[in-house]
Image (cartoon, grey):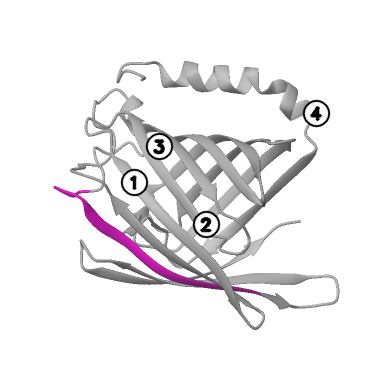
Amino acid sequence: MMTKHFPLHTFMMLVVLVSTPLLTNAQSIGFGADFYNRYVWRGYDFGDSFSVQPGLAFTAGNFELGTWGSYSISADGARANEHDLYATYSFDLGSTTSLALTVTDYYFPTDSDWLNFDGDGEGAHWIELMGAVTLPESFPVTLSAAFMVHNDPDNSLYLEGALPFSLGDVELGLTLGVVAGMSGFYGVESTSLVNMGLSASKDLQITEQFSLPLSAAYIMNPTTEKTYLVFGFSLSP
């Protein structure tokens, strides 16, 4: 486990250097951006404003290295701006079952006290380990567990189940997320249901060569007693 005073900038530089062979020999490179009326993550609204979310990922075999961000278009919402780095390795368990292990550095570059808890700039970093198992196609539910290992005195544990299905040409999904125990990060004092959602997505055909992916989601956080209706679209080469 990393200590609170571990030099995160040094750690992330080492990640980039070690990953240089992947960057130069990547089998695929993906980049683009999502545009949403709200950035809602695990049942919580970050920034309370329209959000632009760019991403860049390099893939080689079962390994993926990527970076993702969320930036508010309003000055008030900018305090929740976020820029993450992540690395994922996926395992094929057979019978269309898979396991993905991910380490993510959530970084909030704001200079306010909202997320910088220790006053030296490193408090904006949160390191999370996550494992996700996707079951066979006959019942393709994904079960995931995410554990905060840096900068979180509660070592918050988030558990989620997600089930995709379709109705006609619309892809749908059900999500259920729980924080397992007391967590200052999630603002709960005991095990709490924080994320219930129904999502829908479909490509809008613009021309024969170009379609625009659209998505919408109804999200409820029973703990905070808040609901959100999120709509967005994606752009990528």
* Residue 214 in the image, given as x and y percentages of width and height: 60, 72
Q: Which mark is residue 52?
A: 2
Q: What's under tag 1, amino acid-wise?
A: Tyr
Where are the magenta residues, as a range? 187-202
Q: Is residue 194 magenta?
A: yes
- The residue sitting at 40% across, 16% down in the picture is 7
Q: Nearer the viewer, mark 1 or mark 2?
A: 1
Q: Secondary structure at mark 2?
A: strand
Would you name the residue on which mark 3 appears?
Answer: 109
Q: CA distance from mark 1 to mark 4?
A: 34 Å
Between disc 3 and disc 4, the foreground one is 4
The correct choice, above or below, for 233 with respect to 107 in the image is: below
- Label 4 neighbourhood size at 10 Å, few (<14), some (14-19), many (20+)? few
Distance of label 2 from label 4 (alpha carbons): 29 Å
Q: Main secondary structure of the magenta part?
A: strand
Q: Earlier in the sequence, mark 1 or mark 4?
A: 4
Q: Secondary structure at mark 3?
A: loop
Residue type, mark 3 in image: Pro
Circle nearer the N terminus (2, 4): 4
User: How far is mark 3 from mark 4, CA to CA?
Assistant: 30 Å
Residue linked to disc 4 = 25
Find residue 75 and report its horizontal and vertical position in percent. Answer: 37, 54
Q: Callout 1: 10 Å neighbours few (<14), some, many (20+)?
A: many
List the single residue furthest toward the right: 208
User: Which residue in the protein does label 1 denote?
Assistant: 158
First in sequence: mark 2 or mark 3?
Answer: 2
